[in-house]
Image (cartoon, rainbow, N blue to C red):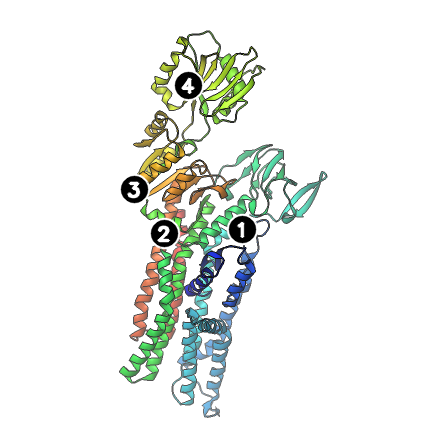
């Protein structure tokens, strides 16, 4: 594709095809994202529609294991080709350009024309019809469909200059063959530089692709065998030595090590991994020999999912691009009309056909729909790619635009502002009875080990961490009641339970201490978990969820950004208030269910707030979807399931601020690109019409307009690095 019209034309053609639900064609990345019903239309038929429309097709980026040499092919076949065409065009155009300054004649005439001019005609023919053939070919294809694009303008401009010059030579007038060759050469130079720049916008994406491992050491009957990554299947075992990359996602079944996940999650610290831990493919094994049982292959791996999400974001469009697309559809026909008006106007005003021809060609050449087509996608490619390198996945281009109106950030508490890993803060004994702390802990432990509840895990972790001596008491007839706790019978057939206050059935005078315990302000920072036997509360555990270390700094930065901050939590109001007080957050809504969180967000939106909701991405899915922009604190294992428009691969709140900054900087670049693309055409076309530009200068200006838009997009990465 050579301009925005190519992209919009393909998009319209695909969108109106029966069986295709949605189609988005990206000019900068040269890709189409097509959603279709394969019971109505097949992939081969879709490809046929595109090829019959005059365009070639590259293979998709994801192979079996998520990597490919697509970019190498693209560079060699497309990029290398235009480089050769440019080189030859410069060689063949140079004698004609020199002829502008040094008029040389041989004195040998043929058909009344000097031999030097015949050589000029031959050189111009090579440049215009051979090196410039792709422009004419695409213009012809567009004409058959009664459409026009940038190739139409270039083809018409150069052909008019060429044939006018032939007529002028035979009529003994001044010819402009060099104009046709210079236009082709400068356009090729512009496309060459544009390709270099666009290639740079995809550097982050190529970096992700290149992370993929090509070979692995598979264990076959205890013997190492080096195989291609595509040969690995689920349940195969591979051995990974220090300094090597883990080939695919899986569990460590032997050994321990430290891994560097920074290339996937942005986490700079090495992470300790041992037997039973999950590891991701393509991350670097630092210092231990490990055996990994493969759990994910192909597009199921974390790397493949990340590549897919980034690709989809880079191929999607921000809503602001719709304005440019609508303008691009009518742009070329309008330019053709303006060129005709220019020719007619100058011909009758100046009575000079040569000037009229020159200025009309300038109008054709100066017009640049390319800049409009590159304005949005190049900025999104850079922003989405940079975010991926930092462990922040933007799922759509729309995410960058939504940020401009955001007025409020709402946080879920558990797992978002806090670590989501409850710990035992205090242990209380019933002062009314004689009981040892170890007896309370052991009874709670023997109940908790039969549950997967986070509070149960906190007790187990505490016992193991404090190395408390365990007794072998057996709990039987265990039942777990949601919203209350765990129930069972001990070895003396006494009823025992572990849970909240609701586990205590009948009133008992010796349980009055519970009321005092709950009323103490210092106990409002967490949840109280009681241990009970035969209706008597033996003791309690204060379970807290620690704040993330970065939470306070993040809230302060968001306040500096003039954003309102709120907490919506399913935890007790007192606990939510305690967290809010520590962070200086005034607006708190606690003790709500997921659907009540959703209603609270809708209520804020009805008051005119534009909301970012930050949640854990699983329980908070409805809220993430309802918010104007949802940010999911996820992990690389379940990124495909996340409901947010933005997904954090690392559970680090500072990434929320970083995501907002990336979005703002990227969208600012989009607006700047569109402004300059519109401004260029609105100013330069009238200048060409009024005779202030010749075709050569017009060709230079047209090429520079596209390059400047791409360079401005590349500037996004530099700005973000400075803000990091």
Residue in front for this viewpoint, 371 or 398? 398
- Residue 489, percent across and down? 54, 15
Per the rendering, the mark at residue 667 is: 2
Residue in front for this viewpoint, 90 or 620? 620
Please give the residue where the numbered disc 1 appears in the rendered image. Answer: 209
Label 2 and label 3: CA atoms lie apart by 26 Å
- First in residue order: circle 2 vs circle 4: 4
- First in residue order: circle 3 vs circle 1: 1
Label 1 and label 4: CA atoms lie apart by 53 Å
Q: Are marks 2 and 1 in contact (CB under 8 Å)?
A: no
Per the rendering, the mark at residue 522 is: none
Please give the residue where the numbered disc 3 appears in the rendered image. Answer: 606
Query: Tag 2's secondary structure?
Result: helix
- First in residue order: circle 2 vs circle 1: 1
In the picture shown, does residue 158 fall above or below 666? below
Query: Tag 3's secondary structure?
Result: helix
Label 4 and label 3: CA atoms lie apart by 37 Å
- Residue 65, percent across and down? 59, 49
Please give the residue where the numbered disc 4 appears in the rendered image. Answer: 501
What residue lies at 46% left-to-right and 24% top-to-bottom?
Answer: 423
Query: Crowding near pointer 4: few (<14 within 10 Å), some, many (20+)?
Result: some
Label 2 and label 1: CA atoms lie apart by 25 Å
Can residue 441 be seen here? no
Label 3 and label 1: CA atoms lie apart by 43 Å
- Residue 221, percent across and down? 72, 39
Query: Tag 4's secondary structure?
Result: helix
């Amino acid at each position: 594709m050579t301009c925005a019209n190519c992209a919009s034309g393909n998009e319209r053609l695909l969108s109106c095809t029966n069986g295709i639900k949605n189609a988005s064609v990206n000019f900068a990345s040269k890709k189409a994202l097509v959603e279709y019903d394969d019971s109505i239309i097949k992939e081969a038929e879709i490809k046929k529609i595109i090829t019959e429309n005059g365009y070639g097709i590259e293979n998709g980026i994801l192979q079996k294991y998520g990597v490919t040499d697509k970019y190498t092919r693209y560079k060699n076949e497309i990029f290398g080709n235009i480089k050769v065409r440019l080189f030859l065009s410069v060689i063949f155009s140079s004698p004609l350009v020199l002829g502008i300054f040094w008029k040389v004649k041989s004195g040998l005439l043929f058909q009344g024309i000097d031999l030097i001019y015949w050589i000029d005609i031959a050189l111009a023919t090579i440049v215009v019809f051979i090196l410039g053939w792709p422009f004419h070919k695409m213009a012809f294809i567009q004409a058959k469909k009664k459409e026009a694009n940038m190739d139409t303008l270039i083809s018409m401009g150069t052909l008019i200059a060429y044939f006018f010059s032939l007529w002028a030579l035979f009529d003994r007038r001044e010819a402009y063959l060099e104009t046709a060759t210079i236009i082709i050469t400068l356009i090729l130079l512009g496309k060459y530089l544009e390709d270099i720049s666009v290639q740079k916008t995809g550097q982050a994406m190529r970096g992700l692709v290149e992370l993929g491992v090509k070979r692995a050491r598979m264990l076959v009957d205890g013997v190492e065998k080096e195989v291609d990554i595509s040969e690995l299947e689920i349940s195969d075992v591979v051995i990974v030595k220090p300094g090597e990359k883990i080939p695919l996602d899986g569990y460590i079944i032997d050994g321990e090590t430290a891994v560097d996940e920074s290339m996937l999650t942005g986490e700079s610290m090495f992470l300790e991994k041992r037997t039973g831990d999950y590891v991701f493919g393509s991350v670097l094994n630092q210092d231990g020999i490990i055996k990994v049982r493969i759990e994910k292959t192909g597009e199921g791996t974390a790397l493949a999912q990340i590549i897919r999400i980034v690709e989809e974001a880079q191929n999607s469009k921000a809503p602001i691009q719709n304005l440019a697309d609508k303008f691009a559809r009518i742009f070329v026909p309008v330019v053709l009309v303006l060129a005709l008006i220019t020719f007619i106007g100058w011909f009758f005003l100046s009575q000079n056909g040569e000037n009229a021809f020159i200025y009309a060609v300038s109008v054709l050449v100066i017009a640049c729909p390319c800049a409009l087509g590159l304005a949005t996608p190049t900025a999104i490619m850079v922003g989405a790619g940079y975010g991926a390198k930092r462990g922040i996945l933007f799922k759509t281009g729309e995410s960058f635009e939504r940020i401009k109106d955001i007025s409020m950030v709402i946080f879920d508490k558990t797992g978002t502002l806090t670590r989501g890993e409850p710990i035992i803060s205090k242990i209380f004994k019933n002062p009314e009875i004689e009981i040892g702390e170890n007896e309370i802990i052991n009874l709670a432990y023997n109940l908790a080990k039969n549950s997967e509840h986070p509070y149960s895990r906190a007790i187990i972790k505490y016992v193991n961490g404090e190395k408390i001596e365990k007794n072998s008491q057996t709990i039987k007839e265990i039942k777990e009641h949601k919203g209350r706790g765990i129930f069972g019978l001990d070895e003396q057939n006494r009823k025992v339970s572990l849970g909240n206050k609701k586990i205590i059935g009948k009133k008992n005078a010796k349980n009055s201490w519970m009321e005092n315990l709950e009323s103490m302000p210092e106990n409002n920072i967490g949840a109280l978990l009681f241990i009970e036997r035969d209706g008597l509360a033996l003791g309690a555990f204060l379970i807290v969820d620690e704040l993330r270390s970065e939470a306070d700094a993040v809230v302060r930065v968001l306040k500096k950004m003039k954003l309102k901050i709120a907490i919506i939590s399913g935890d007790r109001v007192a606990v939510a208030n305690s967290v809010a007080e520590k962070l200086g957050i005034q607006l708190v809504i606690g003790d709500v269910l997921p659907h009540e969180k959703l209603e609270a967000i809708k209520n804020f939106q009805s008051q005119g707030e534009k909301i970012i909701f930050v949640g854990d991405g699983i329980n908070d899915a409805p809220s993430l979807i309802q918010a104007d922009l949802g940010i999911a604190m996820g992990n690389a294992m379940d990124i495909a399931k996340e409901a947010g428009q933005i997904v954090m691969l690392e559970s680090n709140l500072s990434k929320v601020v970083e995501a907002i900054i990336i979005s703002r900087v990227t969208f600012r670049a989009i607006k700047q690109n569109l402004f300059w693309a519109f401004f260029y055409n609105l100013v330069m076309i009238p200048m060409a019409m009024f005779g202030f530009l010749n075709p050569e200068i017009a060709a230079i200006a047209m090429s520079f307009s596209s390059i400047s838009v791409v360079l401005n997009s590349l500037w996004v990465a530099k700005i973000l690095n400075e803000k990091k």
